[in-house]
Image (tube, rainbow, N blue to C red):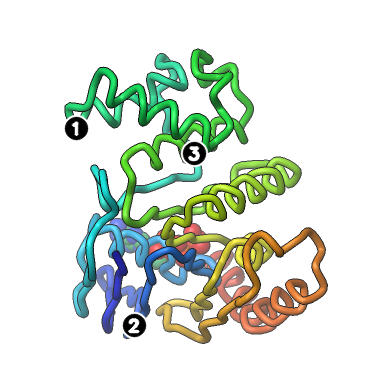
Amino acid sequence: MDIRLEAISHRYGDTEVLRDITLDIPSGKIVCLVGPSGCGKSTLLRFAGGLERPLAGRVLQIGDVPDGCLNPLTYVFQDFALLPWRTVRGNISLVLEDHGIRGARAEAIIADVLARTKLTDFARALPKQLSGGMKQRVAIARALAVSPAVMLMDEPLSALDSQTRELLMDDLVSLWTRTPFTAVYVTHNLNEAVRLGHRVVVLSRRPGTIREVVEIGRPLSERGYADPDLERTQKHLWDLMREEARAADEELIDV
Ligand SMILES: Nc1ncnc2c1ncn2[C@@H]1O[C@H](COP(=O)(O)OP(=O)(O)OP(=O)(O)O)[C@@H](O)[C@H]1O
């Protein structure tokens, strides 16, 4: 399933947040949204996920959802949002229980997503026993369990230290390489954007408009740490954003 955002504009009271955003999220690709603080990235993600409606424009879902899809639009949040009293397995089974899936069918799905996220040996652990990176893997496994058409990822790695973030990026790349998924991925981190994005959408300062859409053709599995081509692309993204990021930062200080 593709998502098309068509001529989206929005304001909260007197604050114009987004202006005339038209954007395609093609099936099987990761589209990263980057831009200065407060430019409307998370708002756009909520519109894509149908959690909120824009004042103008529309969000179209085009095509079929994947086989076995229980929840077409599924979020992965920065803070993992795991239930502390449930085990890894229990956190994943919960989303299946919500859809009335139990027994052998649930077991098969849980085994599959635990294997895909390399968590099989941790099925009985409680969240408090896990590192931040492992918790986020559980959150990703839980999202995958519902076979989403599109994963909506709001800064999923930003609560993690830089080494853990590197490891999780590798995990996301191998996950996508084995079975491509579709994602809208909001991040402040331009390195994440160039490592994980097939398409990087640079938004301007608020009201967010699209400044540039950067396509990155190189396969995810061939994008290594400190790759000179990717560093050039990352620099280009930062050149697009630098002044506006500073202005947005100073605007926050003025408030
Ligand atoms: N529900 C709401 N009611 C009022 N204002 C809101 C609401 N949600 C967001 N805003 C405002 O809309 C603007 C865009 O917010 P949003 O969180 O989408 O930006 P962002 O680019 O994701 O920000 P950041 O990079 O800092 O996370 C901000 O000025 C924010 O204060």
Residue closer to the observer: 36 or 7:
7
Name the mark nearer the viewer: 3 or 1.
1
| Residue type for callout 1 | His
| Labelled disc at residue 161 | none
**Mark 2: few/some/many CA within 10 Å (<14, 14-19, 20+):** some
User: How far is the residue under mark 1 from the one under mark 2?
Assistant: 33 Å
User: Do the residues under discs 3 and 1 have CB atoms within 8 angstroms?
Assistant: no
Measuring 71% from the left and 64% from the top, which residue is drawn there? 223
- Quadrant containing the N terminus is bottom left
Measuring 65% from the left and 73% from the top, which residue is drawn there? 218
Instruction: Provide residue 183's location: percent of width, then percent of height.
Output: 43, 59
The tally of labels here is 3
The first of marks 1 and 2 along the sequence is 2
Find numbered disc 3 in the image and state the secondary structure of the residue it sits on: loop
Whether residue 21 is situated above or below residue 59 in the rendered picture: below
**Mark 3: few/some/many CA within 10 Å (<14, 14-19, 20+):** some
Residue closer to the observer: 33 or 170:
170
Q: Report if the beta carbon of the residue with label 2 is closer than 8 angstroms to ligand 1.
A: no
- Which residue in the structure is indicated by mark 2? 22
Residue closer to the observer: 165 or 206:
165
The first of marks 3 and 1 along the sequence is 3
Name the mark nearer the viewer: 1 or 2.
1
- Which residue in the structure is indicated by mark 3? 79
The first of marks 3 and 2 along the sequence is 2
